[in-house]
Image: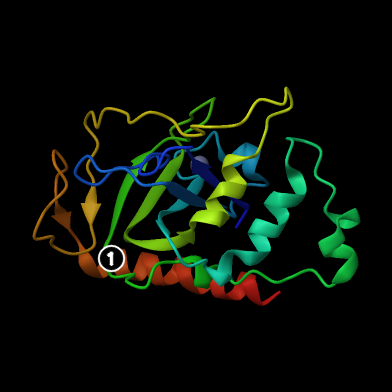
Amino acid sequence: MAQLHFHWSDHKGRGSEHAFNGRTYSMEMHIVHFNKKYDNISESMHHKDGLAVIGVMFEITRKENPHLDAIIEGVRAVKIEGTEDFHSSPQFRQNPIQPTIRLENLLPNDLTLFFRYKGSLTTPPCYEAVTWLVFHDTTDIGLKQIQSFRELMNSEKVVMSDTFRQLQALNERRVEASRRLSDPMTGAATHVDRNHLLTHLSLIVSSLLIITKY
Ligand SMILES: [Zn+2]
């Protein structure tokens, strides 16, 4: 795994980069992996099989999601882009042991339904180097927690809202589903190759488990 990051908006129900039947979500998390056959992420971006990104949608709930606590603490310590000072933050001084984030706790409960397609990075240079794997089930984020993201400012001290790329045309892409849906994605082909996809998914999930142990 190379990194994970989030896309959000200051409007409820907007902020995700993927949509299911036209419906978008308040936040989307991307867990970015690069292919080990390349030296680093910058090199892997130039290859069609360079990157695998897992997408997880978040829905706002009244209750906070305790699994996000460590991330929210980090977000609150940033405030302005490029000025993060987590090590001198009161939270860090009180508790200098860095909290561990278990990535599998940030994944949705139902991992059986997900979509896969070959696509691109959603930020420039938008290279077509990504195998996307997007879960249909969502994860929760508390209203106060997403508020911390919505208060983040860029280096010009302008609030960063709408940190997502607009939906792109499907073009000739084939979107695969891990299992049949009663309500399929509009416009998406539903070629189902369940065993292959599940193997692919379990490999990714087990690599997450391994990574988060260290
Ligand atoms: Zn992203």
Whether residue 3 is situated above or below residue 164 in the rendered picture: below
Q: Nearer the viewer, residue 182 or 142?
A: 142
Which of the image's four quarters has the N terminus? bottom right
In this image, 197 relative to 32: left or right?
left
**Which residue sits furthest left?**
182
Residue 211 locus on image (x, y percent): 63, 70
Amino acid type at circle 1 is His
Residue 32 visible (yes or no): no
Using a 10 Å C-alpha cutoff, classify the residue at mark 1 as few (fewer than 14 neighbours), some (14 to 19) or many (20 or more). few
Say which of 55 and 68 sits in front: 68
Q: Quick check: can you spot residue 12? A: yes
- State whether residue 114 is above or below residue 147: below
Q: Between 83 and 126, which is closer to the camera in this rendering? A: 83
At horizontal 67% and vertical 45% (from top left) the residue drawn is: 40
At horizontal 31% and vertical 69% (from top left) the residue drawn is 198
Q: Quadrant of residue 145?
A: bottom right
Residue 141 locus on image (x, y percent): 48, 59
Q: How many marks?
A: 1
Q: Residue at x 54, y 25 (%)?
A: 125
Asked which secondary structure carries label 1, the reply is helix
Please say which color scheme the image uses. rainbow
Hey, which residue is sitting farthest top in the picture?
Answer: 156
Percent coordinates x, y for residue 61 in the rendering: 42, 61
Tell me: is circle 1 under 8 Å from ligand 1: no
Q: Nearer the viewer, residue 62 or 47?
A: 62
In screen coordinates, is 63 left or right of 110?
Answer: right
Q: Position of residue 203 (x, y in %)?
A: 44, 70
| Residue depicted at 19% across the width and 44% down the height | 21
Q: Quadrant of the C terminus?
A: bottom right
Q: Residue beneath label 1, please?
A: 196
